[in-house]
Image (spheres, coloured by chain):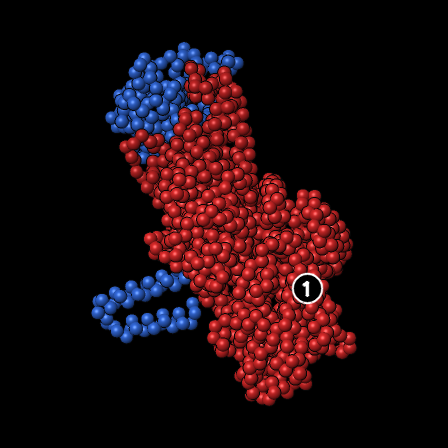
Chain colours: A blue, B red
Amino acid sequence: MTDTDRGTQRDRNSAFYLFSPPSNQIFLSLIFCWSCYGCCVAFYLFTQQNLPACKPVLTPEWVFMTFLFIGFIFIPVGLVTLRASHSVVEIVERYDIGCVPEPFRINKVSYIQDDSIPKNCSLSFKVPKYMKAPIYIYYQLDNYYQNHRRYVKSRSDKQLLHGQNQHGISSCQPVEVNNDRPIIPCGLIAWSLFNDTFTFIRNRAELKVNRKNIAWKSDREHKFGKNVYPFNFQNGTLIGGGKLNPRIPLSDQEDLIVWMRTSALPSFRKLYGRIEKDLDVDDVVVVHLMNNYNTYSFGGKKKLVLSTTSWLGGKNDFLGLAYVFIGSSSVTIAVVFTLLHLLSHRH
Amino acid sequence: MSGWDNIRSSTRSQQGRSHSLNQREPSRTVTLGRVQPQAPAFRTIYCNDRDANFAHRYRGNSVSTTKYNFFTFLPKGLYEQFRRVANLYFLMVSILSATPYSPVHPVTNVVPLSLVLLVSLIKEAFEDWKRFQNDMAINSTPVDVLQDQRWESIPWKKLQVGDIIRVKQDGFFPADMLLLASTNADGVCYIETANLDGETNLKIRKALERTWDYVTPEKACEFKGEVQCEQPNNSLYTFTGNLVIDNQTLPLSPNQILLRGCSLKNTEFVVGVVIFTGHETKVMMNSMNVPSKRSTLERKLDKLILTLFGTLFTMCLIGAIGSGVFIDRKYYFLGLSKSVEDQFNPNRRFLVVLLTMLTLLTLYSTIIPISLYVSIEMVKFIQSTQFINKDLNMYHAETDTPALARTSNLNEELGQVEYIFSDKTGTLTRNLMEFFKCTIGGEIYGTGMTEIERGVAERKGIKVQEVPTSINSVREKGFNFDDVRLMRGAWRNEPNPDACKEFFRCLAICHTVLPEGDESPEKIKYQAASPDEAALVLAAKHFGFFFYRRTPTMIYVRESHVERMGKIQDVSYEILNVLEFNSTRKRQSVVCRYPDGRLVLYCKGADTVIYERLVGGSDDLKKVTREHLEKFGSAGLRTLCLAYKDLAPDVYESWNEKFIQAKSSLRDRERKLDEVAELIEKDLILIGATAIEDKLQEGVPDCIETLSRAGIKMWVLTGDKMETAINIAYACNLLNNEMKQFIISSETDAIREVEERGDQVEIARFIKEEVKKQLKKCLDEAQQYFHSVSGPKLALIIDGKCLMYALDPSLRIMLLNLSLNCSSVVCCRVSPLQKAQVTSLVKKGARKITLSIGDGANDVSMIQAAHIGVGISGLEGMQAVMASDFAIAQFRFLKDLLLVHGRWSYIRLCKVVTYFFYKNLTFTLTQFWFTFYTGFSGQRFYDDWFQSLYNVIFTALPVIIVGLFDKDVSSSLSKRYPELYKEGIKNMFFKWRVVAIWAFFAVYQSLVFYYFVTVSSSTSQGSSGKMFGLWDVSTMAFTCVVVTVNLRLIMICNSITRWHYISVGGSIVAWFLFIFLYSGIMTPYDRQENIFWVIYVLMSTFYFYITLLLVPVAALLGDFLYLGVQRWFFPYDYQIVQEIHKDEADDSGRTDLLGIDNQLTPDEARSYALSQLPRELSKHTGFAFDSPGYESFFASQLGVYAPQKAWDVARRASMRSKPKPKPNKIN
């Protein structure tokens, strides 16, 4: 702005005060005038490319300060996060091989596909640390491509919500109809429902597993219909996984809902239920499980996971470690930068 | 190198054509642009008879330069758009995404594509509309046409072939027309051809005697004639045809033709018959289709896009092969056991690979930044319309002309220019000659100081003192001289009053100027063929020797203070002989008789020729005068030596006889006249010398100096003579005495000798040999200097005729090598076509970025040939401007245009492009990493809408803001450190290295995004123990990507305005708003409800915030470290300047604008202490004198026949050998 520009602006401002209290019209016109003027100035500055701007110059001081600042923020956050992760007690038991009786170990696939062989099996483990309720029970599958394109798209959200509908189940291929009647719920995902079951016994007393409220509330309420009941499900020649109770509406079939929230990676955990009792150190927990689900054909692992949670979730050191690593490397870089800055003179 | 072929073929056809013309007259036609093959038939035009002409269906006179019309707009516009590979690719991908192989919904690709097309088409339509309006304005200019014995005013477009029209003074000719009659006596009219060839000298056109009377409408309507002439062609300087009146056939020549684009001067009005109309006029046939220019950066961008295609293909191939390997029946949950579609059929793995290729192609399509082109276009459009057009630094207040970017394609090209080709007249100079200094009897007069002197002084650190102008100083256009010692008779007190008197008389008598108007000193106007002469006569007037009347034999001068102070008397001098000026003689003499009978020969001319003819003795004067001449020359002034000689009556008489004899000879008259002149022009007595300033445009030397510091090399291409060109080169600081100058000229004795013999083939062969020899010699020498460490700077001066041969394919490489070694090149006497050839020689041969600047129609081809054409606007001629890409009012604005706008645009565009590249690569690579964990199935990581809006909403605006506002150093610093511009010439900001660094960080960041997010989300999140699914993870990752990519943008900014904050913040906020809405609403339409409620779930966990802090910082840490290290250890020049000036407040453009104005105001007194200057000795003495059309102009006034000077050298040469047998009688 030139001096004259400033002068006019000042004049306008003083005029504004001189006439105060102004009549409404003058007031409005002055406001209008002023804002129009401001606009003009802004546009002038724009076309002359002189908009006020800050010009950050990344001097070594700035670099140093920034790195130091990041270090000071990240190391504490990382430590807190790590602590949260370490406060979680997690028990992971792989059972897919252990649960196949010795004679069948050579051909596990035929074992799992043979319905005549009983599939029960038990595991036992000792609780290493005190676990505070609620203790979450997960099953973990590996090498299971729930995120495969063919798998992910093989579902019909419309059908899950609204039920019987001939249309809109074409996406469910190849499991959309059986005997010319639509399958509810259709699609590969539902068809391959995980169906191992677990019962937990501590000190000969069964630990009650709460299997309610394991799915996302939003899924239960908005994606799975309250009036939609399984129909014609797993009636085909090939049975992929678990069956559903046709008298329970889909919105209450929480196993299905959990299962149908497809995982991001081929190795994933899904929530099975909660034990709402604390487990003490050295408690021996025996798990009776029905080893129904076939992961043997593609060599997938099955694991049972018992875990408590912290405010941050399950046991995962990654975030904390990453924070600490980045924080400490920032500090290191800052120090190196300072040393270089002190030792050498630029230009 | 296809451009060469075009040029070669055009020269060949030109030669072929001129050969056929040689039957009629042995002339070489010099043409603009191509020469079209002519239809064999002649055209017959019935004058003043529309019905008869109707049968021929000649084209109308309306002119259209638009690209589209209403119907062709959509198909042609779309075709233009799809010529861009990226758009075509997206069309293909859009089609592909409608097939079942696509993992994404068509909307993902269709929405951005249609948005991009829409914006581009609107822009095209807007630009074409402006062209249309311009055409309309031209087409509806009124012109008087003869209808029913009256002049009716009709618009240009209604004009038809055969119409008789009237054009008034200063009016433009609406079509090519045959001159019938003029209000001037003898059917003569004067025209200015500035629009065609840039020459502002008036040309004479003369109607056939038979038609002189048809001036009034009553008479003109009686005119019934038939014009038989050649078909329309683009040769400006030829015309063959006959006019048939009353069964009498009169031959027509170019002398009777008035071309469209020229304007009428000094004539009240002329009457003519329209011959060629509209697009068939010669000037329109010369205007080539404006080639749509693409900037080099954009072409390089195409390479980048191709590389991206390569990357894309590789990624797809890897993924596809993976999918072929992966697919297996053992994954029973994929339902592969029954009949399976081809893409997943484990039995047909090869097909799986192929189809997955298609899938992945659509999935990874985001790697090609679709909105890049449209963003660039938008940025450039605003840059040109808002910044360049509205820049007050480039606004010329006197003519009220702002800069004008006529195309927005080339903004960033302005930042990389390495060679500037400049026209001289009107561009570097104002074509205004001002009497500036003189030396009389060994004494320098005139206290002024040229800009170049001032520049030299300033460079040497001498403070130039301002001397106040004397009270008596007179200033007039053409006279800028201030010295009290000479004005108002003060010269009588000078040591050498007699010399002064002779000096003034010589100025007042020895010339060919015609006075016009009232015979008073204030009102008189001098009509001169050359502005130098006018300036000299004007000077004589101010010195008190007022030349006010001329008759064929007498010159009347009103002399003041001659006998005593204050006495004014009218003196008449009888002019006995005029020995004319021509380029070989380089001098002009007048023999006059004083009223008292004294016979004197006054002579003025080049110092070389005058000094040869001086009488012996008085060596001191000669030496001193030569020193003065050198001084004038190095100051860029044009000098003429004045001399006189008293003649004894008997000597004169005997000589005069010979002269008359020579004059009346029919053969070789000119040569004989020259010989006779030699006899008397000897033993001259030196009086002194004049120094005329060929007034440069404001700020030219300073601008050229700055540009050369910026690493830009400047070539001057001019139609002027060599002396003039060299002179201007001195004046502009392009040449100086420290330079080694290579001069390749056709004006050597050897060549002239061969030319005399007249054998065209022999001449061509000889000149070619000569040029080859010279080139070789110069090149050898140049290379010697080049290898030596501190050799002088080199300069090449070449004239048009030599250039013609030097541009021959066999010599071209040599010419190029030589000229690239020279820091400045001056080409004189070049035709418009040669200008274009030289330009494309550098453009294509050296692959450097070229800029041509000019103001006249003769510069059009050069302007179009260069990467960037700049026209000088604000003058009358608009041809150059119409062909140009940028129009500025003054040459000096080039500094702002290049160093400020060009540089900024370049840096901004580089940032925009590399950033686009980075953000799309990063985004797509996260998707790519995900593919490895989905069994290579091509499952999309992100939701369709995320992907389609990523480019057009979440990351679109900030990068445009950077393209508009980023400013590394302020405009004044850009001009203060022109060296910064070199970074653009070297293309420092868009090298593969730069791209590779961006690519490296894109890979790094994408890995951080993908792995940090997926690994950290592999266990339960939050205390509810629930797990995240695919869409939760991807939304998390996408959030990180959007935030990081936007923050990364802030890191590339050199200046951050609030618009940066608003746009960056706005983009991030836009993402959150979008996802809040998108995941909050369930629509009844068939939609995969994957994203429902996801963001709310995510945001209810601590995990979200912890990750959102971690991932962007982790991703940007590498970049930040790189930026810090780069700036510290390998800084760019601009970064150093930034740091030097980092504590200074941002200058307001206003102050530096004022600074410039102060420096350059035209009214600023130019008197500085001359004595302060160090004396420079030089060989250059500054002789230059313009006289196109000279002899004929003067001769015709005297009733003496002289061949009409044509507009170019080649033609003149040929005409001299065959003068027309029938002399035109005047009087």
Position of residue B472 relative to residue A129, above or below, is below
Residue named by callout 1: B661
- Residue B1155 in the image, given as x and y percentages of width and height: 51, 69
Q: Residue at x 45, y 32 (%)?
A: B93
Camera-side residue: B351 or B850?
B850
Say whether residue B1006 is left or right of residue B95.
right
Q: How many marks do you count on the picture?
A: 1
Q: Secondary structure at mark 1?
A: helix
> For residue A162, which quarter of the picture?
top left
Question: Residue at image x 31%, y 21%?
Answer: A184
Q: Are there few (<14), some (14-19), or many (20+) residues within 10 Å of tag 1?
A: some
Given residues A165 and B382, the one toward you in this image is B382
The spot of residue B1136 in percent (x, y) is: 59, 59
Is residue B70 visible in the rendered structure shown here? yes
Chain holding disc 1: B
Q: Which amino acid type is shown beneath numbered disc 1? A: Gln
Q: Is residue B1155 above or below residue B111?
A: below
Q: Which quadrant, please, contains the N terminus of chain B?
A: top right
Relative to A118, residue B780 above or below: below
Does A246 sit left or right of B409 as displayed? left
> Of B697 and B597, which appears nearest the observer?
B597
**Extreme front residue here?**
B247
Q: Position of residue B55 (x, y in %)?
A: 40, 40
Q: Nearer the viewer, residue B427 or B892?
A: B427
Q: Is residue B871 above or below residue B110?
A: below
Name the residue located 47 percent from the left edge and 52 percent from the top edge: B178
Can the viewer see residue B117? no
Residue B423, x across and y down, in percent: 57, 57
Residue lying at 78% horizontally and 75% vertically, measured from the top left = B616
In screen coordinates, is B344 left or right of B807? left
